[in-house]
Amino acid sequence: MAKYIAQIIVLGAQVVGRAFARALKQEIAASQEAAKRAGGGPEGARRAAANASTGLTLEEAMQILNLDKLESEKIQKQYEHLFSANDKAKGGSFYLQSKIVRAKERIDAELKEKSPRPDQSPPKDTS
């Protein structure tokens, strides 16, 4: 009886071990692919930080707001339209409203990083 219980425990541990190893390999492959898509280097690190802070990638945020390029006027127009269309008083969804707000925050973070900072002046021409 004890022999069978020991065999069951060993087989169970092997199955769990294999599943864990497979999941670990998939996670490593997924993170490497995400790093390639983000561009790697400092730019990739910045994008990864922005993605983690808002929980959305830039592409997902653009899909939520139905944008094809980053134009501040169109972003604001789409945001206002979708936010008001999903107002709970009008029968909308608070969940969708929160997704719209997070998408706008993610896009704003991207635009903030792309815009030149006031403390950075353009290089002077000394010729």
Image (cartoon, rainbow, N blue to C red):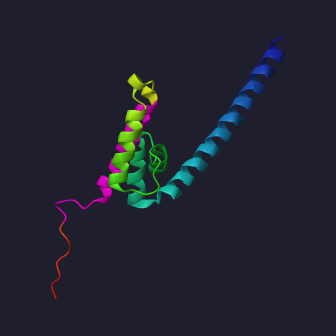
Residues 99 and 38: in front is: 99
On-image quarter of the N terminus: top right
The mark total stands at 0
Instruction: Confirm whether the magenta stretch covers residue 110.
Output: yes
Residues 80 and 53: in front is: 80
Question: Relative to 68, does residue 102 appear above or below in the rendering?
Answer: above
Would you say 119 lies left or right of 18 here? left
Question: Relative to 127, does residue 9 appear above or below in the rendering?
Answer: above
Residue range corresponding to the magenta coloring: 96-120
- Which residue is rendered at x = 64% and y = 39% of the image? 23
Q: Position of residue 109 (x, y in %)?
A: 33, 49
Question: Relative to 95, does residue 105 appear above or below in the rendering?
Answer: below
Residues 70 and 73: in front is: 73
Q: Quadrant of residue 91?
A: top left
Instruction: Confirm whether the magenta stretch covers residue 102.
Output: yes
Would you say 113 lies left or right of 65 here? left
